[in-house]
Amino acid sequence: MAISPVQTVTGTAATSATSVAVTITGVAAGNTLVFIGSGNGITSASVTSVTDSAGNTINLMAAKNPVSSSVAQAGYILNASAGSHTITVNWSGSASAGGSMVIREYRQFDFYSFDQHIEHTGSTDNPMTSTASPTTTQAYENVVCWCCRLGSTAPTVGTGFGNFTVVNGPSNNCQSVLEDMTVIAKGTQTGLVNDSAATSYACGVMTFKSKLIQTPSGTGASSSVSVTMDATAAGNFLVIGWTTAVATSESISSVVDSAGNNWTNAYSQTDVTGNASGVYYLPSASNLGGITSVTITFGQAQSGCLAQVREYTSLQNPVTALDKTTHQLSSANPATSGASASTTVNTELVLGVANTLNASANPNWSAGTGYSNFVESLFNFGGPVFIYLGMEEKEVSATGAQTATFVNAGLASTATVVVTFKEVGSSQEGSYLSIIGSGS
């Protein structure tokens, strides 16, 4: 899955420079900055220091040497201060071949805390690789691959990655690369950058936990639908979106999880085609941890039903988390929920939920502008007819009306709901060690 970075900036250091520095402006408070800086042509190359003009704590990966005269330094800043940041990587001497740097800003929601990493140096490998990281600790994580490559032939994006950026040093033989992707299952992660003219390199991978932890789904064709999931952590916030294909209006008998909690209705509706959909949630205070399933029981048997659960960390929602909702049926592209009333606190989670019927197993729809982490489910409940459920989200930092949109090329009428949940606080995890270990 693709990530939507806030911005990417690049820069170079002239030949004979003793450092490379790049300025990124307009950074939003709380966001995460990730960077890679490289230098080449340095006698016994090493990194002497890395600084941020805004004074934020910089967390560094182990510096790596593709060859003895070059050095690569990757790192990140969590919970960055608002405004301008100039990140400077200083070397042990002048770089006769110059240097280069890439800095990328990500929203705090997607890059909430650091998880795993590994670094590697090699030569004549295609693709260039970080080797495999330790196993990630939650399902939804964002993976950043960085690379320092010596040579003038341009590398290309690795399999599964996107947002590929490469910048050449002034002598075209000191290249810095960043690329990224989202994964939705726990596992080891490997950075890959394709290189048709294999040469000496350093490559690493960093993984970051999102506030969105997991998005399991379930299907059914009876009077209930269940979703199984990894055991939830105590205090996390849970929502479930659902949809059914029915001939008349729908009612919910219960929404109960494996711990015996009754979930709260945020919004339910039936559109003119007979499709019903809605959102239930479990406040953080009710989640004591260890929930492994949730079941929706309907008031009548269904031709088809879908449900998707989302677990979020560190939203710190009170029992009164629910704020604003609205919905509408739309045949337009993009489909839209219409605008809600203005939200009541600055920081809120905005959830979009959409459902429709279609005669194709390839609905070809996606998140609307400003939304991310789009996940779709579909179920064939007879003949060529499929029912679809799509969910997306964004986090806002100012009050205002909210509208969910879904790009739905080729689909029929779509019922779209927007639901907002108040966040009380958004505390960041603590600082990490300055140097976070080493790979091979």
Image (cartoon, rainbow, N blue to C red):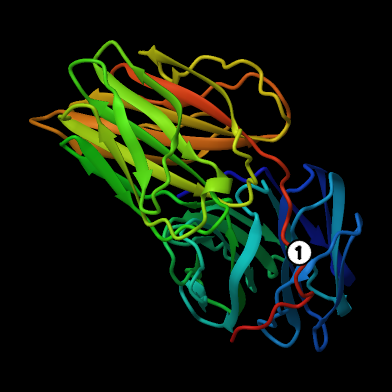
Residue 379: which quarter of the image? Answer: top left
Regarding mark 1 in the picture, which secondary structure is present there? loop
Q: Could you tell me which residue is drawn at 73 percent across and 67 percent down?
A: 75
Question: Does residue 345 appear left or right of residue 341 in this picture?
Answer: right
Viewer-proximal residue among 127 and 264: 264
In this rendering, position of residue 283 left or right of residue 411: right
Residue at (71%, 79%) from the top-left corner?
62
- In the image, residue 327 lies at what x, y percent? 45, 17
Crowding at dot 1, Cα within 10 Å, few <14 / some 14-19 / many 20+, comes out as few
Image quarter (top left, top right, bottom left or bottom right) of the C terminus: bottom right
Left or right? Give the position of 141 relative to 422.
left
Q: Amino acid at mark 1?
A: Gly
Residue 47 position within the rendered picture, expressed as x and y whole percent measured from the top left: 82, 78
Q: Position of residue 43 (x, y in %)?
A: 83, 86
What residue do we see at 68% from left, 58% from top? 167
Residue 410 seen from this side: no
Position in image of residue 104 (x %, y %):
69, 52
Nearer-the-camera pick, 144 or 222: 222
- Side (left or right) of 71 relative to 410: right
Give the total of numbered labels.
Answer: 1
Check disc 1 and report the residue beneath it. 430
**Could you say which is closer to the camera, residue 96 or residue 319?**
319
Q: Residue lying furthest front in this view? A: 260
Q: Nearer the viewer, residue 367 or 254?
A: 254
- The image shows residue 112, relative to residue 94, as above or below, that is above
For residue 167, say whether it is visible. yes
Q: Residue furthest left?
A: 383
